[in-house]
Image (tube, helix red, strand yellow):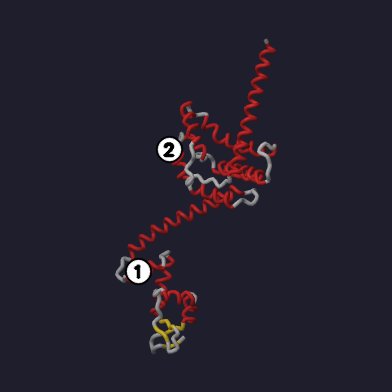
Amino acid sequence: MESQSATEKTYAIGAFAKLTGVTERTLRFYDRKELLTPSGRNAQGHRYYTERDLLRLQQILTLKYLDFSLEEIAEHFAEPGADLEQSLSLQYEMLKKKRQQLDQAIFTIERLRTYVDGTEKLDSGLLLMFIHNIQNEEGQKQYLSERMPSVLVDAIYHVGVDEEVRLERERIMTLTLVELLSHCKAGKSPTDPEVLAVGSKMVQIVTEVLAPAISQLSKQELSKLEQEIEQSLDPVLFQISLSKEEETFLQTVMEELEKREKEKEKEKENQEDGGESDGH
């Protein structure tokens, strides 16, 4: 600590940094940005600070704490008559918005952790696809609501379903998708019994989610729904990070399951018809 006058204390940059808890590097940076110019320099050209500089630094740190950018802080100091109260009101609204964004980010991560619980290491593209779809869920709902019956959209997004049930359904869907894609990467055939067993799990959960809603639709609504399904979804809202090979693999699995289900139904009908004939 040095003395510039009999009444005013001065501090070398190291002492000032220790006093304030701000690094010397930051103090030099603030000097270059003209946010906090030292009160003077000694004969060797070294910076020295006074208690007036301490007040200025406290103001800078307070505004930074309120999430003002350095540019905004510089503008405030450049206009001493600026309305700080109005600036604080604007900053308050910005911070509320940022808090909402942080809450949404935390919610997304928590939900994603539930999805991937029990899965093997996920491909980064698939992980980002899940994050994208969670973040854009409200936009997706709006998009589908303009094209599909509300009862079906509600079913797709588990509206009115218990939170634990919804998360468990989504977790199973994620597990089965990841497992199917791992079979694809391993070079297994879409008709492999192990692959079809996993595919059946996916069909089962989708049926559990959608069948009650579909049963409420009229023939006209079903016809319109089939037409909508044939249309491509908005790629910005509905991100699908799958390779062409993976898409073809999943499609073939679903087609094979559908074909086998029809064969079972036909066989059952034939048996029933045969039973009726025997009865006559």
Q: Residue at x 65, y 26 (%)?
A: 264
Q: Position of residue 216 (x, y in %)?
A: 50, 29
Front residue (pair 230, 244):
244
Front residue (pair 246, 264):
246
Disc 2 is placed on an element classified as loop
> Of the numbered discs in the image, which one, if any, rests on residue 225?
none
Q: Position of residue 55 (x, y in %)?
A: 39, 76
Which of the 4 quarters of the picture holds residue 254? top right
Q: Position of residue 209 (x, y in %)?
A: 55, 36
The residue furthest top is: 280
As measured in the structure, the alpha-carbon distance from the residue carrying label 1 to the one carrying label 2 is: 47 Å
Q: Is residue 110 above or below residue 1?
A: above
Q: Amino acid at mark 1?
A: His
Q: Position of residue 155 (x, y in %)?
A: 51, 37
Label 1 CA crowd tier, 10 Å (few <14, some 14–19, many 20+): some
Quadrant position of the C terminus in the picture? top right
Disc 1 is placed on an element classified as helix
The residue furthest left is: 81
Residue, disc 2: 146
Q: Residue at x 52, y 29 (%)?
A: 215
Q: Is residue 83 left or right of residue 34?
A: left
Q: Amino acid at mark 2?
A: Glu
Front residue (pair 34, 65):
34
Q: Is residue 135 above or below residue 213?
A: below
Label 2 CA crowd tier, 10 Å (few <14, some 14–19, many 20+): few
Q: Are marks 1 and 2 in contact (CB under 8 Å)?
A: no
Residue, disc 1: 76
Q: Is residue 235 above or below residue 24?
A: above
